[in-house]
Image (cartoon, rainbow, N blue to C red):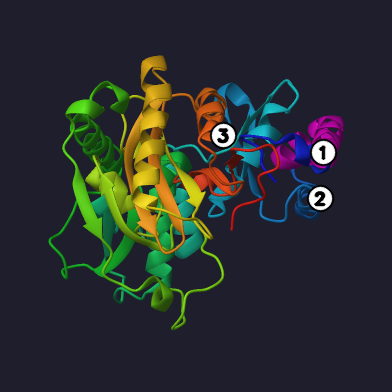
Amino acid sequence: MRWAFPDPREELPRRKVIRRIDGWWREFASRAARVGELLREGGDWDLVAWMNERLEAISDHLAWEFVDGRDGALRLVITPEGQRRLRPLVDVLLRRAPRIPGWEFHAFRLPEELDQAELAVEQRTGLRFEELRVRATRSPGGLIDLAWTSPACAGPDDERAGQAAFLATLALLGERCVDQWIGAILVERAGDGAGGDPPEALPERVRASIDAARARLPESACHRFCDEARWSIYSLDSDPAVAAGGSTPPDDWPRQHDLLVGRTMLPEMWVAARRGGRFSSCRFSRAGETFCYLKIDGAGGTGDRLAGRSAIEDAVNATLVPAGLGCSVGGGTGLRYSYIDLALTDVPAAAAALREPLRARGVPLRTWLLFHDDELGDEWIGVWDDTPPPP
């Protein structure tokens, strides 16, 4: 079900979930004082079971935690953790939260003070926080890899050290930063690597690395310089059929899994979107653009698919660029589908503007606007009113 870009055909099931969300908040508001009393003074009420039961009615992939907030308030964090495709649902859930005195609600775990990070690591793992050291290095796709060391670490497969590294990273940087910018979190024995910084230096190191990465990006949105951009051509080495686990192509292909050749004016973005790891548009645009793509079904079609895609790409740019809504930043051809990569400054407005020229060119019913960002992995916009869900 789509939440960021809702479709009228999903209105009934969406209303059912919204009723559960509103029911959850009504019950939480009625018990907020009791929850606060339990958190501050203790008691025998099974708060964990109560929270799990209520939130599972909305989604069974939601995690939660209570922590101290600002100015004496209590903070409730509700997060999908690794299920980032559920972020749009969590956004809706938090937008419908009531105002309750003494409470604040968040969709991400916020960075903690150093003493709280130290307490979390030592209580949960037993490793001494002050003995940890960390190195931050930039990796392909704009991510930042972290390598943690500890004298108590037995090696790269030490689960306790790995848990300590993750807890320290999350507590020091906050969940949003980890989701968008942090790649691998590795552990090493002290002395195996090249040393590192104490944990308290990590936030500044990461901020500096993010600032440097963003400084290398163009200041303007892509539609302002797409006419002068250089283009790179890519050919995928592996056979998509073999990559899918068989010797012959499947009946259909999700995302861009059938891609054979492509072109782009943003090589690092293009590669990152196809690496299979995390993708966040903020790593590739300083102008707030969202990177997405049109997926056009070519099954049963006739004629030159490359020429057809080029004509559609021209129509897309003729619609988006003058309005400042975005532009094409690449394209590709697969075994079945054609693709046009887009950088959009306003997704709803751009999607609405594109429908008329795309329909006028007779694009197939199975034509979708899809998204590279993990958080939008379940979202799609059909070009036609009766476009079915994508594969």
Alpha carbon separation for disc pair 2 and 3: 40 Å
Given the image, on which type of amino acid does mark 3 rest?
Answer: Arg
Position in image of residue 46 (x %, y %) = 81, 53
The crowd level at tag 1 (other Cα within 10 Å; few <14, some 14-19, many 20+) is: some
For this rendering, which residue is in front, 100 or 279? 279
Q: Based on the displayed image, in which of its 4 quarters is residue 66 positioned? A: top right
Mark 2 Cα shell of 10 Å, populated few (<14), some (14-19), many (≥20): few
Tag on residue 99?
none
Which is more toward the observer, 41 or 266? 266
Magenta region, main secondary structure: helix
| Residues marked 2 and 1 touching at CB (< 8 Å) | yes
The tag on residue 359 is 3
**Between discs 1 and 3, the one toward the N terminus:** 1
User: How far apart in space, not on screen, are marks 2 and 1 (Cα)?
Assistant: 9 Å
* Residue placed most toward the observer, 194 or 362: 362
| Residue at horizontal 53 percent and vertical 22 percent from the top | 349
Task: Give the quarter of the figure containing the C terminus.
Answer: bottom right
| Mark carried by residue 24 | 1
Q: Say which element carries label 1.
A: helix
Image-quadrant location for residue 171: top left
Check residue 162 for magenta coloring.
no
Q: Which residue is the extreme one toward the bottom?
A: 247
Q: As drawn, is 221 to the left or to the right of 48?
A: left
The residue indicated by pointer 2 is: 57
Q: Is residue 23 magenta?
A: yes
Q: Which residues are magenta?
A: 14-41
Q: Amino acid at mark 1?
A: Trp
How dense is the environment of label 3, judged by Cα within 10 Å: few (below 14), some, or many (20 and up)?
A: some
